[in-house]
Amino acid sequence: MDCWRNLLNKCSVKQLFLICLLCGIVYFTAHQIKCHDVLKWESSDIRHDTSLRYVYNPNCTTQSDREYEVDERKRFPTSIVIGVKKGGTRALLNMLEAHPDIVSAHREMHYFDYEENFKRGVEYYIDQMPVSRPGQITIEKSPHYFVTKYVPLRMAMVSPNLKLILIVRDPVSRLISDYTQLDSKKVVKNVKRQLFEEAVLLKNGSVNTDYVPVQVGLYSMYFKNWLEHFPLDQILVVDGGNFISNPYEELKRVEEFLQLKSYYQESQFFYSEEKGFYCWKTRRKTQPQCLGDKKGRTHPNVPDHVMEKLKNYYKSSNEEFYRLTHKNFNW
């Protein structure tokens, strides 16, 4: 007390004010350091999250800080769209991303099918994902997964509880779309082009089974491989044909499969005469969302006899696929 009394006698009012101000700054700074976010490295086995996580210090004396935890981080996907190429994977992912509880990677990861990526480990894979918050699920899509033999085993080893989404359409229609995309790239590169029938048929008139886009449409062959590693109830097969004409119906199925709260309304979707397919409205963006100009390319006119030959080629595979999925797509 004598110390403080002497200080008061010797100091002017201005000096005392400065001393009080300095004491206040020291206290405030110490409090902020005490309550500052703590950066923690959370690591677990490859089936779970491995990420940097910001957590508020529990010793902080501020009530709001004690009640609030920041948990925005990159997470291992809950679900993966595994295919099929030209089946509608991009449109599906874009529409799914409108759901407030879904975040999606904006490019194809190719983690499980590209050896150089897989060797980098699961931490690398998670680091490619978008940031999500509690209650949201992360999704990525890489259509090449579906047709790559060793991918199902790799996925099952890394995350056996993954929910897989496969969107398929009439394999003949898918083949024509695949050819159209490849042909458009040849135009850009000024490479020699082939007519559709020249690409899919041999000179003797039989189907060219060495043409990779033809092979992709043999859904049953690839699907059997997936069923060896994942039960059917972990794989949702989306009807790509119905998705084109009624996206709302298929999105509600995905919503239920992923156990998400109801979000989609039929009024969100409208057919664009200009684009030739459905666009959608979201609550997060003021402008309607549509697929890019590279979607909806003009397809070639395919002779009837070629269409019939391709339908016959895929018939047995289609029927087996119906049995495996417990669903008749009427292709």
Image (cartoon, rainbow, N blue to C red):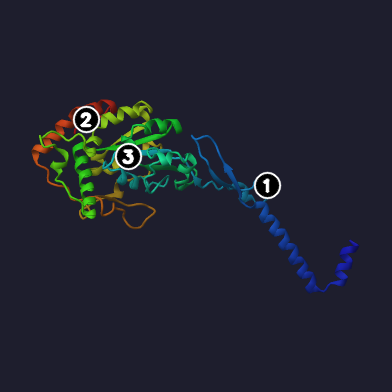
| Residue contact between numbered discs 3 and 2, judged by CB atoms under 8 Å | no
Horizontal relation, residue 61 to residue 328: left or right: right
Q: Badge 1 is on which residue? A: 59
Farthest residue, direction right: 2
Mark 1–mark 2 distance (CA, rounded to whole Å):
62 Å
Q: Badge 3 is on which residue? A: 144
Q: Is residue 314 above or below residue 52?
A: above
Question: Which residue is drawn at the image coordinates 34% and 29% (left, top)?
Answer: 226
Element at badge 1? loop
Quadrant assignment, res 244: top left
- Residue 33, labelled with which disc? none
Q: Give percent across and percent down for residue 119.
A: 45, 39
Q: Give percent across and percent down for residue 106.
A: 38, 49
Quadrant assignment, res 29: bottom right
Element at badge 2? helix
Name which of mark 3 and mark 2 comes first in the sequence. 3
Q: Quadrant of the N terminus?
A: bottom right
Mark 3–mark 2 distance (CA, rounded to whole Å):
20 Å
What's the amino acid at mark 1?
Asn
Q: Quadrant of the C terminus?
A: top left
Question: Which residue is drawn at the image coordinates 56% and 46% (left, top)?
Answer: 53
- Within 10 Å of disc 3 (Cα), the crowding (few <14, some 14-19, many 20+) is some
Mark 3–mark 1 distance (CA, rounded to whole Å):
49 Å
Q: Give percent across and percent down for residue 127.
A: 47, 45
Q: Badge 2 is on which residue? A: 318
**Which-is-in-front pick, marks 1 and 2?**
2
Name which of mark 3 and mark 1 comes first in the sequence. 1
